[in-house]
Amino acid sequence: MREPLLKSAEPSLDESQIGYPGWKIVLASFFGIMVSFAAIVPYTFGLFIKPLAESFGWHRETTSAGFSIAALTLAAASPGLGFLLDRYKPRRIVLPCIVIFSAAYVSLALLTPHLLHFYLTFFVIGLVGNGTAYIGYSRAISTWFNRRRGFALSIMLAGTGLGAMLLPILVQAVITHLGWRVAYLTLGLLAFAVGFPLTAVFVRERPVAQQDQDISTELGETVIEALATPAFWILAATVCLYAVSVNGTIAHLSALLTDRGVSAAGAAWSVSIIGATGLIGRLLTGLFLDRFFGPRVCQVMLLMTVLGIVLLSVANSLTSGLIAAALIGFSMGSEGDITPYLLGRYFGLKRFSTLYALTWTTYAIGAATGPILVGRVFDTIGSYRPITIQLLAVPALIPCLLMFALPRYRILGARGRPIDLLPEPQPAEIA
């Protein structure tokens, strides 16, 4: 495909200028993420739990297993996708993933009472899910930005927030008026119509000849070197434990609130508010990352997650549900920004996608664990008791302590080896 749009750009353009070509990649990635696995699966899955139970008689734990299958498959497939993205251009991997992901969701409109169909479809969705989400887009953006990388990544990731804000309302309206089959069909067609053309036209890495040393894709630590550092495992443990808390909460949020007397429309609004506050959280976190030390920013956001989950555990009205969801959503917006930002700062871009994918593997393990545990507890005791939800806050609290062990940022020498430690960034250095 012809690429005159970006290759002809002046490398001297500043990242802060609106005409800088990297912002076009950011905008296209924003809309791609908005209809990706990251927005569609976590934020709409719970809306189908009751309709599927009414149609096929499936228990909530049985249905929740579909989410877990997708998450575990995503965990297993992500390192392979990361390796391919480090080896080939993003579009060559992302575009086929979008096609398969969209087709899988369309096929759910033909769902039968046989659970094998449901599980196999979510297996396929998990197989290509991360190819439609953060990994490919994050690498492309990171090659274009250095000093404004946090803000650029935050704009891209804000696409998840907008998707989480709009998609639950759209899906619930379609389910109410046209049925859950049309809702699945709508999601599949939307994912293709929005994501495919924008990615095909705009998303690509910065040409190597125009890359500065600080953002060169040819410099950075190898996977083995990165895995030998405590910093990587702290980041991996953080995203895994965080995922247990947040995904266990979100997957059952709608069912929890409706069981406590909130209307289905009100519960959908609670899911939607997560997207709205997540969008704000992502943008603000991007600005904070460009000005303050990333681990400290992360600790503050994790504490907001804990507070939101504790409040949700005792929520008995739409108002309290909305407030709890807003806190959780704001902190969720931050987590997506922080992980790729810190990986790039600590380990460089040479194997960025592979390392990011490995952290996604740990995230997916946590994401698979949370929902199915809550579903099992519900099926055992028959309700969402406050203590059950409160226990979900504990995994999000543990990383707050782990973050104190992260070192200062490193810079890389000519051969990609760390040669110095950068001090914690101060606002004056970024302004």
Image (tube, rainbow, N blue to C red):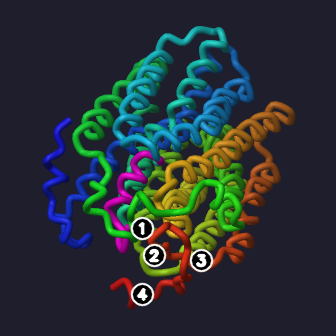
Measure the C-alpha gap from mark 3 to mark 4: 14 Å
Q: Among all residues in the image, which is located at the extreme front?
A: 415
Residue 170 percent coordinates (x, y): 39, 35
Instruction: Identify the residue position indicated by label 3 in the image.
Output: 296
**Residue 1 is at least partly visible in this image:** yes
| Of the image marks 3 and 2, the number of the one nearer the N terminus | 2
Most prominent secondary structure in the magenta stretch? helix
Residue 126 percent coordinates (x, y): 57, 31
Q: Nearer the viewer, residue 321 or 103?
A: 103
Q: Which residues are magenta?
A: 135-150
Task: Say if the magenta span includes residue 167.
Answer: no
Measure the C-alpha gap from mark 1 to mark 3: 14 Å
Q: Under tag 1, what secondary structure?
A: helix
* Amino acid at circle 2: Phe
Q: Quadrant of the C terminus?
A: bottom left
Residue 150's disc number: 1
| Of the image marks 3 and 4, the number of the one nearer the N terminus | 3
